[in-house]
Image (cartoon, rainbow, N blue to C red):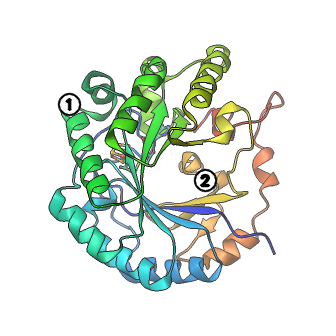
């Protein structure tokens, strides 16, 4: 039997009130065959029994899901560590109060892709910097553990120091840093967002230098794979699409040959334990040198 995943992401819905240009989920409209509440509960029971570290609710926009509070409440009942990744725009004081009452322990990740409206809104849409800041402030005010989720791209990488200063001024607990991967809607915006391989090694070095300077002032979670480290896909993490399809990483969501199974047909534990992560390596080119595998699978 394999060790259970450290983190399982689950895409509650593809419904979203934003249309971010980098979005790998191509979120916007709801998908017809999304898992229902009973299916979600069965999945959560199974993950808890497997001792999965974090069940990370993503989307689309999780706060638009009609049963989000019931899901958070069920997670609390199970004693499962939950995380919600949100664009922050629907986190009004009233909503945040409800979340607090339902599950005060849920970890909150709010996406912000720049330290100013111009940079963030180029990616996330006009007016959405202000909306995300509102959400972050409300979550902080109600005492949640808040992490800013920041995706580095060609337009924002040189503003990281300002991002960190903003995060500190907002009083969040941490910053998660990942890099743009051209998948889904992001594929249409490669020219604007992608940092070519040659330049990336220079950029990542500068990013890690800045992280080193501020590491005692804020918690950083830097995706190891962005600097050539272990790619966690199918090894310590899995991602479940809104329709139940399990993939080693959300970036492989459109590649049938990389699907691990479907929780509507088999239990997650069976899918996970019968998966051999080295099968993913068969799809990698000979020049793979480590790091995020999605960047090497060109047809995503
Ligand atoms: C798909 S969103 C869903 C949750 C929520 N709507 C949000 O924006 O945080 C989850 C995370 O994936 C990131 N993301 C979306 N497309 C990406 C891409 N092409 N490359 C890297 N990260 C991406 C988002 O910025 C966000 O932090
Ligand atoms: S990244 Fe998040 S907020 Fe933006 S379109 Fe995708 S799901 Fe919506």
Can you tell which mark lies on residue 202? none
* Residue 15 in view: no
Look at discs 2 and 1 and give the one toward the viewer.
1
Q: Is residue 77 left or right of residue 119?
A: right
Above or below residue 81? Residue 77 is below
Q: Which residue is mark 2?
A: 256
Circle 1: element type: loop
Place residue 282 in its image quadrant.
top right
70 horizontally vs 8: left or right: left
Q: Is residue 224 above or below residue 58?
A: above
Q: Are marks 2 and 1 in contact (CB under 8 Å)?
A: no
Residue farthest to the front, as pictured? 216
User: Which residue is tagged 1?
Assistant: 126
Residue 157 in the image, given as x and y percentages of width and height? 48, 22
Q: Residue at x 50, y 78 (%)?
A: 44
Q: Residue at x 58, y 76 (%)?
A: 47
Q: Residues within 10 Å of mark 1 (few under 14, many from 20)?
A: some
- For the residue pair 216 and 286, the one nearer the viewer reads as 216
């Amino acid at each position: 039997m394999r060790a259970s995943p450290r983190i399982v992401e689950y895409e509650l819905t593809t419904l979203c009130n934003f249309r971010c240009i980098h979005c790998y989920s191509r979120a916007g409209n709801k998908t017809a065959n999304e898992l229902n509440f009973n299916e979600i509960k069965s999945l959560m029971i199974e993950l808890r029994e497997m001792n999965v570290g974090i069940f990370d609710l993503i989307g689309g926009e999780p706060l638009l899901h009609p049963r989000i509070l019931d899901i958070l409440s069920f997670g609390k009942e199970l004693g499962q560590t939950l995380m919600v990744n949100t664009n922050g725009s629907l986190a009004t004081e009233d909503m945040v109060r409800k979340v607090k009452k339902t599950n005060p322990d849920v970890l909150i990740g709010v996406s912000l892709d720049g330290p100013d409206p111009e940079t963030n809104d180029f990616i996330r849409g006009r007016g959405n910097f202000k909306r995300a800041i509102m959400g972050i402030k409300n979550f902080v005010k109600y005492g949640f553990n808040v992490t800013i989720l920041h995706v580095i791209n060609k337009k924002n990488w040189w503003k990281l120091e300002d991002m960190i200063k903003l995060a500190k001024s907002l009083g969040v607990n941490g910053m998660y840093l990942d890099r743009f991967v051209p998948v889904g809607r992001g594929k249409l915006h490669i020219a604007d967002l992608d940092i070519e391989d040659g330049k990336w090694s220079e950029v990542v070095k500068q990013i890690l230098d800045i992280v080193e300077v501020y590491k005692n002032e804020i918690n950083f979670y830097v995706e190891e794979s962005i600097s050539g480290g272990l790619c966690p896909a199918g090894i310590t993490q899995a991602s479940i699409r809104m329709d139940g399809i399990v993939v080693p990483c959300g970036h492989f969501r459109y590649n049938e040959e990389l699907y691990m199974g479907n929780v509507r047909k088999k239990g997650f534990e069976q899918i996970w334990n019968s998966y051999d992560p080295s099968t993913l390596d068969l799809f990698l080119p000979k020049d793979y040198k480590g790091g995020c595998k999605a960047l090497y699978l060109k047809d995503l």
